[in-house]
């Protein structure tokens, strides 16, 4: 009993004890604790950035697709560049790009 007499009165306050218990639960114990919320916000920002990137990429791809559907010259250019296609009376010469002198391959 002597031990209880040495405890300060503000530590015996039931409201303070309840508030501290609530803070511990909210900060550390709960499945939606503060640290989990911070990680989720960070992940959300990364996903929104990724969404913006892919949205612009999809818009560019749609624009290119529409150009391929409507303009035969664009289709021919695309086929020549991507698939190395040529006309019957043409010869195709592939010139490799200069490699980096530091890169020893």
Image: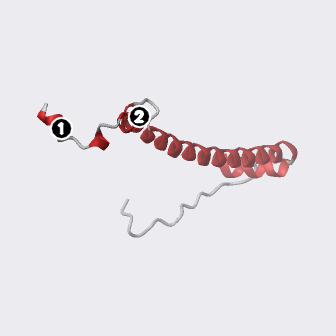
Q: Which quadrant is the C terminus positioned in? A: bottom left
Residue 86 in sight here: no
* Left or right relative to 74: residue 79: left
Residue furthest right in the image = 70
Per the image, label 1 sits on a secondary structure element best described as helix
Residue furthest bottom in the image = 101
Percent position of residue 86, x then y: 72, 49
> Mark 2 or mark 1, which has the lower sequence index?
1
Q: How many marks?
A: 2
Image point 50% across, 67% down: which residue? 98
* Left or right relative to 44: residue 77: right
- The quarter of the displayed image where residue 95 is located: bottom right
User: Which residue is more in the foreground, 39 or 63?
Assistant: 39
Q: Which residue is mark 2?
A: 22
Percent position of residue 11, x then y: 29, 40
The alpha-carbon separation of the residues under discs 2 and 1 comes to 26 Å
Q: Of discs 2 and 1, which sits in the foreground?
A: 1
Image point 79% across, 48% down: which residue? 63
Q: Which residue is mark 1?
A: 5
Residue 45 sits above or below residue 103 on the image: above
Mark 2 crowd level (few <14, some 14–19, many ≥20, 10 Å Cα): few
């Amino acid at each position: 009993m002597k031990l209880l007499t040495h405890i300060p009165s503000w530590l015996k306050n039931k409201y303070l004890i309840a508030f501290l218990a609530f803070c511990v639960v909210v900060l550390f114990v709960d499945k939606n604790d503060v640290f989990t919320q911070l990680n989720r916000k960070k992940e959300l920002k990364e996903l929104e950035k990724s969404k913006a990137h892919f949205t612009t990429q999809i818009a560019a791809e749609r624009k290119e697709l529409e150009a391929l559907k409507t303009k035969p010259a664009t289709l021919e250019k695309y086929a020549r560049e991507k698939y190395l296609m040529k006309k019957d009376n043409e010869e195709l010469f592939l010139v490799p790009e200069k490699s980096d002198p530091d890169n020893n391959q």
